[in-house]
Amino acid sequence: MPIPKAELHLHIEGTLEPELAFALAARNDVELPYADTEELRKAYLFEDLQSFLDLYYGLMAVLRTEADFEELADAYLTRAAAQGVRHAEIFFDPQAHIARGVPIGTVIEGLSRALDRSEERHGVSTRLIMCFLRDESAESAMETLRAAEPYLDRIIGVGLDSAEVGHPPAKFKEVYEAAAALGLRLVAHAGEEGPPAYITEALDVLRVERVDHGLRCVEDPELVERLVRERVPLTLCPLSNVRLRAIDMLEEHPLARMLDAGLMCTVNSDDPAYFGGYVDDTFHAVREALGIGQEQLRTLARNSFEAAFLDRNAADEEL
Ligand code: HPA
Ligand code: ZN
C-alpha cells in the first residue's frame, strides 16, 4: 500500500500520456509531428527546462474541448489514487490554451467535471491553482486573472511557471497583489533553474506561502536558515530535476540533506507523463537512490498535508 500523501506540484498538462495525446489528436483532427507513441517518447530527452517546455506546449495542441480536459484530469486522478494521493493541488496553464484559441472557460469547466467527481470516484480531494507563464508579460498575466474572475470559486490560488531565468518574480508583483486582494492563495516556481535570489524575491515581493521547487536554496546558507525558521514549504520534484538536468543524477539530489537541515520538504511529480514517474514512483526512487528511510518518507507525507491548502482539521484527519 502506498503511503497516503498530498501532491502539491503537478501540472495537469504534464500528465498528458502519449497514448491519450494520440487518441485526442485523432478525435480532434490534429496532426502531430511524431509517427506514433514510441517516436514521441523518444523525443523525451531534454537538455534543460526550455527544451522540455517546447515539446510540452507543442503537444497541448491536442487539448481542445471540455471533454478533453475532463479526460486528462480523470486519467491523472485515477493514477494518483493508485499512488496513494488523497489530496491534489493541480496547476493549469490557461495562457497556453488561450493562445491556441481555447477559452479559459473550456479549460476550467472541463477540468472541473473531473475534479467535482474525484472524491467520490477516486477518494482524492482536489484544488486548482492557476499558473501565469512568466515568459509572457505581466499585462498578459493580469488579463488572465481578469478572465478567470467568473471562475474564482473553482480556483484556490495562483502560481508562476514556465521559463524561469530572466523572468524574476518581481515582474509579477502587481498581479500577485491583485490575486491576494481576490482572496487567492499564492505560490510560485523559484530556484529551479533560477538563482536563490529568486526564492527570496518570491517570498518578499510576491508574498508566496510555498515555493515550488526551491532546489537552489541549498546554495545560500542564510536563505536555508530563513526557510527553516519560517517553515516555508518547498514542493520538490526530484525526477523532474534529473530529467531537466538541474542535477546530473538522482543520487546527487540534495533532498536528504535538505530534510536533515530541517527544511519543510515535500516530494511531487511535476510533469509525470514526461519525467518517468508519478508521485509514489518518486518516493520509491528517492528511497533507493538516496537511502531515505521510512521515518523520512513519513515526514515527507506529513509535510505534504501540512503544506496543503486544506483547513487544519482536514489536514489533521489525513495525518
Ligand atoms: N518548471 C517551470 N514550468 C513548468 C514546469 C517546470 O518544471 N513544468 C511545467 N511547466
Ligand atoms: Zn513545475
Image (tube, rainbow, N blue to C red):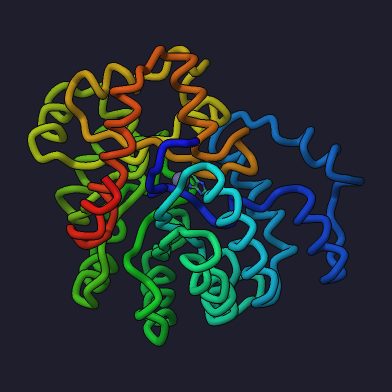
Which image quadrant for residue 186?
A: bottom left
Q: x, y percentage for residue 44?
A: 70, 35
Closer to the camera, 4 or 27?
4
For the point 61% across and 62% down, the residue is 74
Question: Which residue in the rendered view is the most extreme toward the bottom?
Answer: 150
For the point 21% across and 30% down, the residue is 263
For the point 50% across and 68% down, the residue is 120
Horizontally, is 149 left or right of 310 in the view?
A: right
Which quarter of the image is occupied by the C terminus?
Answer: top left
Q: x, y percentage for residue 239?
A: 52, 30
Horizontally, is 80 left or right of 3 in the view?
A: right
Horizontally, is 29 left or right of 135 in the view?
A: right
Closer to the camera, 217 or 255?
255
Q: x, y percentage for residue 107?
A: 57, 74
Q: x, y percentage for residue 118?
A: 51, 66
Closer to the camera, 250 or 318?
318
Horizontally, is 128 left or right of 21 in the view?
A: left
Number of dots carrying numbers: 0
For the point 46% across and 65% down, the residue is 119
Q: In the rendered view, tell whether residue 115 sits above or below residue 55.
A: below
Q: In the rendered view, tell whether residue 30 sits above or below residue 213.
A: below
Question: Which residue in the rendered view is the most extreme toward the front?
Answer: 1
Question: Which residue in the rendered view is the most extreme toward the left?
Answer: 229
Closer to the camera, 110 or 304?
304
Q: In the rendered view, tell whether residue 154 sits above or below residue 172.
A: below
